[in-house]
Image: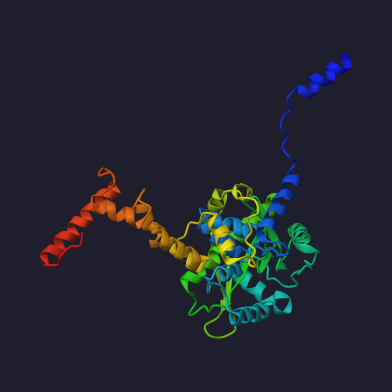
Amino acid sequence: MSEFHGSASRSSTPQPTRTPPPATRERGLRHRLAELRGPDVPARPLDARALAALAANPGCARRAILDGAGVDKARLASALGAPSGFGQSQFALTRGNAFEAKVKADGGAELLRLVHARLDPGAEPPEGASVPDLTAQGPEGRTARTALALREATQAGGWTLLDHPMLALDVAGSLAFLEPDAVVVHPDGSWSVVEIKSFPMLDGSADPAKVGAAARQSAVYVLALEEVAARLDPAPRVRHRVLLVCPKDFSNLPAACPVDVRKQRAVTARQLARLTRIEEIAGSLPEGLCFGPDRDPAELTAAVEAVPAAYAPECLSACELAFHCRERSREAGAVTRLGRPLRAELGGLGTVEEVLAAARGLSGDPDDPAVAALRRAAALRAEALADAGVAVCP
């Protein structure tokens, strides 16, 4: 009897909720992301270019979950009937690969010469530099092999060139594997990122917009390298001046210039930290939702619209879904399609209709600075049109 009562009392006592171990949560998240991506649809890896664009718009939950799930946004945009021209052409890719192969020929001798001349001229010349083999099974294996090669090169001293190493970076609870063009270990044990681009460097300077994009991309690599360095004791220094290598003028000869990415690194780190965790976004979505490109267009549109977006004109040069989101933004009359600076000036006025109503005095708090400015602008416009003899539409 006493045993029975003891069992009963234990069974009636509320048991504390136990949090699943991290491995279980990780497997559950991977399964959920695979469901969102679609059955038998391979995951598209999240690269540094996509991470830089994601960091530039951290408020867009739509891009965060699509990138986190490995959805091919170009195929998704085509399936939605809004294909985008975003991305590199096949010709540009072929030209870039040929130029990169030229720069890295002969064991990276020319590349190391440029690193020595532009980033570390006080060090000994890079003669007989080491180029370790980084091949391994899968991205996890390559990431581990890269970390080991970096540690060995740092301890050995001298020059070491890591050709296409693999780095990992946690992004809102989802692991992204990144592959910079090259990482160089200096004789003093410090590490530098090398970014090779196919756009020309004319008279020692390149297109500022393209250089800025390359700097944001390199900043992501610097962040990932810093995580590797933090696991070593003592932690090696990751240089914040990366080397940008481009064709010189209109030739195929390499030219290089150092680019300080401290600002881009700080902004990217702050924006990535602001991202809502992928598992939180996934958990808020209804069961059965899928972004598979083979779905019915109406069903696919409803799935995409279930995730809020934060469209801005800058998305046109950074996201494959930009045309679709712009059209939806126009239909909703959202002021974000006019640009983030204007959206910030308008305060709580989120649509064009609200802005026009506030300007005409039909709605809005007159003490609101944005409303007061709109009404003042509307009055000045009406006055100017009246002086010109032009009828003002109500």
Closer-to-camera residue (318/127): 318
Can the viewer see residue 193?
yes
Residue positioned 72% across, 67% down in the render: 162
Q: In this view, does 68 lie to the left or right of 267?
A: right
User: In front: 160, or 196?
Assistant: 196
In the image, 58 versus 391, the foreground residue is 391
- Residue 136, image x and y in percent? 80, 64
Q: Which residue is drawn at 66% across and 60% down?
A: 37
Residue at the far top: name it.
Answer: 2
Report x, y in % for residue 370.
29, 50
Q: Quadrant of residue 154?
A: bottom right
80 lies above or below 7: below
Quarter of the image that includes the N terminus: top right
Q: Position of residue 75 (x, y in %)?
A: 61, 70
183 vs 96: above or below:
above
* Whole-percent x, y for residue 119 in the image: 59, 66
Q: In which quarter of the image is the C terminus?
A: bottom left
Asked if residue 164 lies left or right of residue 343, the reply is right
